Image (cartoon, rainbow, N blue to C red):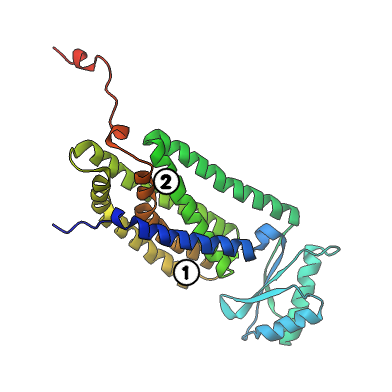
Amino acid sequence: MLKQIDFLGKRKLAAMLSGLLLIIAIVSLAAQSLKLGIDFTGGTLVEIGYKQSVDLKVMRAALETAGFDDASVQHFGSSQEVLIRLQPREGLSNAQLSTEVAAAASSAMAVKGDLRRVEFVGPQVGDELTEDGGLALLYSMFGILIYVAWRFEYKFALGSVAALAHDVMITLGFFSIFQLEFDLTVLAAVLAVIGYSLNDTIVVYDRIRENFRMLRKGSPEQVMNTSLNQTLSRTLMTSLTTLLVLVALALLGGEIIHNFAVALIIGVVIGTYSSIFVASPLVLILGVSKEDLMEPEIEGEDVDMMP
């Protein structure tokens, strides 16, 4: 048999690592926040394609000359396509703004580009999306707290929610540190991370509950270590196969889903780590015991089973 890994024996080291990551994430979020996309801030997005490569410096200079000082310009998919983001402007309709931007961009290239896409989000809609996105995260956490407390025990519920908050905060911190654009697709990825991490944690909790009822000897720490080792191969195989798909999406899926895939990659890695080194140690710290998970005996059950 393979030697068991003492996961819970390393919980202090894991707590230090998690604490450090959370501090870095919180400081970054407080200092520079997230780079919100136009889904949340409001504004106009214009995608233009050309037949030759685009020099972004020349493009930015042309847009500044035309009065679009706040324009954000980047390649989109290839060096021949550009994505231009603009803050909301009063007095200009969506059509007028996109026409002026396309004209200014084409003057930099000396040729007319192919206007591929124009998207507009008003500031009021952006504020509503920001509020709704935050509420979606809070409601999901609250629902998970109730579900796990009902299925297992309140100590497990607190451990799972703390682990999920840990995963979400570190994922958001990663986007803040590297100033990756946070839009609706990334928010969807964060919600998916919550579901993935919870599923992983529930599998571990199920095995812990079974072993608490089956194994008569051993301390809670030993029983939980045994459970973590028994589910380790399943956890790693699931995570690795998921990561293979996500890495392929991040590298080959194009700019539109790149940040979505990156958020999921970070979430899967952190979620796998937290299900082992955060969720289970927190339950142990809260003082879980065999009595907490034993099925209650129904009074008179033995009498009813007599012939």
Name the element at disc 1.
Answer: helix
Q: Are marks 2 and 1 in contact (CB under 8 Å)?
A: no
Q: Residue at x 20, y 37 (%)?
A: 214
Depth check, front residue: 115 or 2: 2
Crowdedness near tag 1: few (<14), some (14–19) or many (≥20) residues, C-alpha within 10 Å: many
For residue 306, the mark is none
Q: Position of residue 124 (x, y in %)?
A: 74, 52
Name the element at disc 2.
Answer: helix
Q: Is residue 222 above or below residue 13?
A: above
Q: Is residue 3 left or right of residue 40?
A: left
Q: Residue at x 47, y 40 (%)?
A: 145
Q: Is residue 62 above or below residue 46?
A: below
Q: What residue type is disc 1 on? A: Ala
For the C terminus, which image quadrant?
Answer: top left
Q: Is residue 82 above or below residue 281?
A: below
Q: Is residue 131 left or right of residue 245?
A: right
Q: What residue type is disc 2 on? A: Ser
Depth check, front residue: 73 or 24: 24
Q: Position of residue 138 (x, y in %)?
A: 56, 45
Q: Count the labels in the image.
A: 2
Depth check, front residue: 39 or 298: 298
For residue 250, the mark is 1
Q: Is residue 96 above or below residue 78?
A: above
Crowdedness near tag 2: few (<14), some (14–19) or many (≥20) residues, C-alpha within 10 Å: many
Q: Quadrant of residue 110?
A: bottom right
- CA gap, disc 2 to disc 1? 28 Å
Mark 2 or 1: in front is 2
Q: Residue at x 76, y 84 (%)?
A: 107
Q: Position of residue 227 (x, y in %)?
A: 26, 48
Q: Say which residue label 2 marks.
A: 160
Depth check, front residue: 281 or 43: 281
Q: Is residue 142 left or right of residue 8?
A: right
